[in-house]
Each structure stands twice: as structure tokens, then as C-alpha cells.
Amino acid sequence: MSLMMDDATLERFKQQLEELEAELRDSVEGKADATAPVQVDSSIGRLSRMDAIQSQQMALGLKARQQQALLRVQNALKAIANGTYGECRRCKGPIATERLEAQPDAVFCVTCAERTQR
């Protein structure tokens, strides 16, 4: 079991992460049309093609961010399975429950996260 976290709290985080994983997976898989290559055909004008390319690039960026979020969620679920959920990866201290409430896939305590961002 993770640091100072009771079974009910751990189960609640697990359920929350599993729901988030399903939501992200559905979203990533649903981006196929928006990220498909823009077809070069003469029926649309140059500006319309540029708009389509811009939309495609924005969709690709969003998909990449969602894939990264999905990976973080999956890693949090693995941490629950191996008993390290709620443990800071840097200092090995506990991650505050309040932080996990706000960001259930957090891997650093607040202090270490602030150091990482500097």
C-alpha cells in the first residue's frame, strides 16, 4: 500500500484514474479524422487548404498532449498496482492527498515539482 493512504482512498483514486484513462483513450482514438493528411485537390482554394492544414496541426498538437496525459495516467495506475502511488519519485516522501485530488497522476510532491519547474 502507498504511503499513509488507506484502502478506500486508494480505491477512489484508482477509479478516478481508470475513468480518466477511458476518457483520454476515447479522445485520442477519435482524433483520426482531424489528424489525417490534408488532401491536395483542386476543388478547394489555397486559403481553405491553409485553414485545413492549420486545423490539422492543432489537432495533432492536442492529440500529442492527450497521449502524454494518457501515459501519465497509465503510469499512475501501475504505481497503484505496485504500491508506490502517492510517493514522490524524487524525494520518496508522500505526495499530499490534496495534490493528488487536483492532479491524480502527479509524480512529484509540491516541493519537488517546484524545483523541477525552475
Image (cartoon, rainbow, N blue to C red):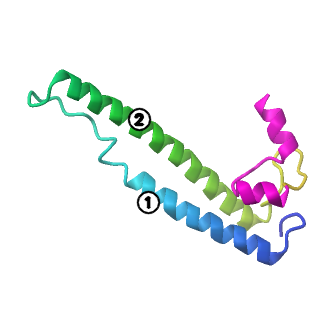
| Circle 2 crowding by C-alpha within 10 Å: few under 14, some 14–19, many from 20 | some
Residue 103 drawn above or below residue 54: below
Q: Quadrant of residue 82?
A: bottom right
Q: Residue at x 83, y 70 (%)?
A: 1
Q: Does the magenta-highlighted stretch encompass residue 54?
A: no
Residue under label 2? 58
Q: Residue at x 80, y 40 (%)?
A: 113
Q: Which percent across, then down, holds residue 109?
A: 84, 48
Q: Residue at x 88, y 63 (%)?
A: 3
Q: Which mark is residue 11?
A: none
How many angstroms separate mark 2 from mark 1 (CA)? 18 Å
Q: Residue at x 72, y 55 (%)?
A: 102
Query: 85 or 42, which lies in front?
Result: 42
* Predominant secondary structure, magenta span: helix
Residue 72 horizontal side relative to residue 50, left or right: right
Q: Which mark is residue 26?
A: 1
Residue 62 horizontal side relative to residue 36, left or right: right
Q: Quadrant of residue 41?
A: top left
Q: Which percent across, then down, holds residue 45?
A: 15, 25
Q: Which of the two discs, 2 and 1, labels the residue nearer the N terminus?
A: 1
Q: Amino acid at mark 2?
A: Met
Query: Is disc 1 placed on a helix, strand or loop?
Result: helix
Q: Which residues are magenta?
A: 96-118
Q: Which percent across, then down, holds residue 54?
A: 34, 29
Q: Amino acid at mark 1?
A: Asp
